[in-house]
Amino acid sequence: MHVEQPSSSLAQVERELQEFEQQQRKRLGIAQSVQHWQDPNPQHFGKTDRDNTTILVGGLTMMQDRFLEAGLSSLGYRIQALDCPDNNSLQLGKEFGNRGQCNPTYFTVGNLVKYLIHLRDEQGLSRQHIIEQFIFVTAGACGPCRFGTYVTEYRKALRDAGFDGFRIFLFKTTGGINQSDPDQGLAFTPTFFMRMFKCIILGDIVNLIGYRIRPYEVTPGSTDKALEQCRDIICETLRCNKIMWPALRRCRRLLRAVPVDRLQVKAKVTIIGEFWAMTTEGEGNYRLQRFLENEGAECEIQPVTNWLLYVLWQTRWDTRWQMDAHRRPDDNNRAQINLKPRKTLILCRLTESIVRTVFTIYARAIGLKRYHLASMDELAKLAREYYQNELRGGEGHMEVGKLIQCAKKNKSHLVLSIKPFGCMPSSGVSDGVQSLIMAKYPNANFIPIETSGDSAVNAYSRIQMALFKARQQAEAEFKKSCEQKGGLNAAKKRLGSKYRNALHYPKQRAAGTASNLVL
C-alpha cells in the first residue's frame, strides 16, 4: 500500500542531497556557481510602437509575400516583404551563421542580414535606428530537424553582423509570443491569422494558374505580364480591405487573354520534397521551376495550403490517439475525458472545411478549373504501409504518399523531390522508402535532388537525364491519344478554340495536358 511521505521527510532528503552535492563539488574542484549560457531574446513591441515599426516578413513564394505585405497592412501594421533569397544571401548566411546548417537556414538568415546591411550601408540608417524600428516575424517549430533552432541561428548571425538586440518574433502552435500581455504590439488574433491564411490561399491560386498557363504560352513573357497585373489588383484589394470576388474576376479576364497552344507536348513534372526547397522560386533551389519550364516541362507544384491541411490532419491524428489511449472498459469518466478531444476534432474539421471552401470559391472566380486540394486522409492511407503516420518532421509521410498517388493515378511523367543537402526527414528517411516504392511501381519515374547552394550544374545534369525519359513518355502518350481519336487534325477540329483558351483545363485521363485535351 502506498503511504504518502510527510513534507518534513522530503525536505530532509533535499537537504542531504544538497550537502552531498557540495561535498562532491569540493572534492572534484568544481565551481560552486555555474553561469549557464542563455540566448538573449529581446521581445518588447508595444501597441504604441506600431506606427513607427516596420515588420519584415518572408520565406514563402514571392506572390504570397507580396499578398501578406498588402493584407496585413490593412490591419494597421507596417509590413515589408523581403526579396527572394539569392546567392548573396547564402554567402552572408555562411559568413555569419554556424557551420553545418541546412540550406534554407543559410538562405533565409542571410537574406535578413543582407537587407539590414542594405539599410545601414546604402540607405544610411544607423544601427540603433534599425534595431528600434524594425522587427522580423517568422514561423517556428520544435521539429526534429534544424528548423527548431532557426530563431537562435538568426540571433547569432545578427549579433556577429553588428545588429545585436534586433527583435525576432515567432508564431507557432506551442509557445511563441505571449498574447496575455495587453500591450502586445503584434497581436496574433483570429483576425490576424484569417487574413494571413487568406493571403496564402490567394498566392497559391495565382501561382497554380500561372504554372498551368506559362508552359503553353505563344508569346514569351505574356503570362508573367498578366500575373504581375493580377498581383497588383489583388494587392490593392487586400490593402483597401475590399471584397475579393470582383478583383479575381478582373484577373480572370487578364489571364484568359493570354494566347496559348495547349496541344504542345510537355512532360508533366510533380515537384515534392522539403517545404522551403520546393516552395522558393530563387537560387535556393537553383530556380528549379523556371529551369524545368525552359526544358519543356509543365510543373505541378505543391500549394502551401496543403501544409495547413497537413497540420490540421496531424492534430486530428494525435487527438484520436489520445482518445483511444484513455478508453478503458471500467472508465466511468470517459465522457469527461473525451470532451476536449472531441471539441478539438470538431474545430479541426470546421477549420479544414473553411479552408477548402475559401480555396474553391477563389479558384472558381479566377478560372482555376479542375484543381482539388489533396486529401490528407488518402495520402496517409497510401503511405501507411511504408511510412508510419506517427513519424513527424518535414512533410512526414506526405512525400511517400504523393509518389504512390502519382504512380497509381498516372498523374505525371516525373516526380522530382527537392530538398536541402542532408535533410534528415526527406533525404535520410523518405528517400530510403522511395526506393521500395519504385520497386513496387515500376512505372514511377522518380529522382531526388539535394541542394547545397552550389552545384547547380550537377543538379541540372541529373534533372535533364530524368527529363529525357519523361519527354519520351509524354510523346508516346500523346501519339497514342491521337490515334485513339482519329489523329491530331480531327482532334483540333473537334476541340474548336478550346486548346487556345488559357483557362480551359481538361479532365485528367492521362499524365500530359495535351493528351488529356485530345482524349
Image (tube, grey):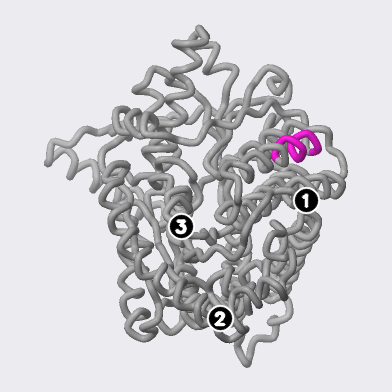
Position in image of residue 57 (x %, y %): 58, 34
404, above or below 501, in the image: below
Q: Real-space Cα distance between discs 2 and 1? A: 30 Å
Indicate which disc, 2 or 3, sits on the residue closer to the N terminus: 3
SS at mark 3? loop
Indicate which disc, 3 or 1, sits on the residue closer to the N terminus: 1
Position in image of residue 63 (x %, y %): 62, 42
Whether residue 383 is visible to the viewer of this picture, yes or no, is: no
Position in image of residue 323 (x %, y %): 62, 78
**What is the residue that sits farthest to the front in this orientation?**
489
| Image: magenta residue range | 231-237
Indicate which disc, 2 or 1, sits on the residue closer to the N terminus: 1
Q: Which mark is residue 481?
A: 2
SS at mark 1? helix
Which of 216/90 is in front? Answer: 216
Position in image of residue 352 (x %, y %): 71, 65
356, above or below 84, in the image: below
Quadrant of the rendered image containing residue 463? bottom left
Q: Real-space Cα distance between discs 2 and 3? A: 19 Å
The reply to whether discs 2 and 3 touch (Cβ–Cβ < 8 Å) is no
Residue type, numbered disc 3: Gly
Q: Which mark is residue 393?
A: none
Residue at the (46%, 57%) spot, across then down: 296
Residue type, numbered disc 2: Ser
What residue did someone put label 3 on?
296
Which of 324/54 is in front? Answer: 54
Q: Give the mark toward the camera: 2 or 3.
A: 2
What residue did someone put label 1 on?
252
Residue type, numbered disc 1: Arg
